[in-house]
Amino acid sequence: MTSHGFRASANSLLNESAKWNPDAIDVEQSRMGADEVRRAYHRAHYWEERVRMQQ
């Protein structure tokens, strides 16, 4: 198992559960947005949902 493999598995399971907004999943996995600086410092997108997802 690699970190990328775990990330892919988690992405599939979270999306298949239909409990979470797909955009929130991508943001949590840092897969959204082309601008690296903006992505690194703007972490509030879908914050409430991302906290519940991690719990």
Image (cartoon, rainbow, N blue to C red):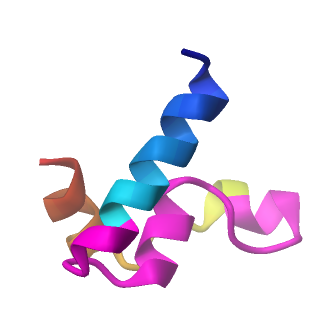
Asked if residue 43 shows in the view, the reply is no
x, y percentage for residue 54? 22, 49
Q: Residue at x 59, y 31 (%)?
A: 5
- The answer to which quarter of the image holds residue 47 is bottom left
Nearer to the camera, 14 or 42: 14
Asked if residue 37 shows in the view, the reply is yes
Residue 35, relative to residue 19: is it above or below? above
Q: Residue at x 83, y 59 (%)?
A: 37
Task: Check residue 13 for magenta coloring.
Answer: no
Nearer to the camera, 16 or 35: 16
Q: Residue at x 59, y 24 (%)?
A: 3
Residue that protrudes farthest toward the right in the picture: 35
x, y percentage for residue 48? 21, 73
Residue 28, relative to residue 44: is it above or below? above
Boundaries of the magenta span: 15-39
Task: Check residue 18 for magenta coloring.
Answer: yes
- The answer to which quarter of the image holds residue 15 is bottom left
Q: Is residue 34 left or right of residue 9?
A: right
x, y percentage for residue 31? 68, 61
Residue 39, relative to residue 48: is it above or below? above
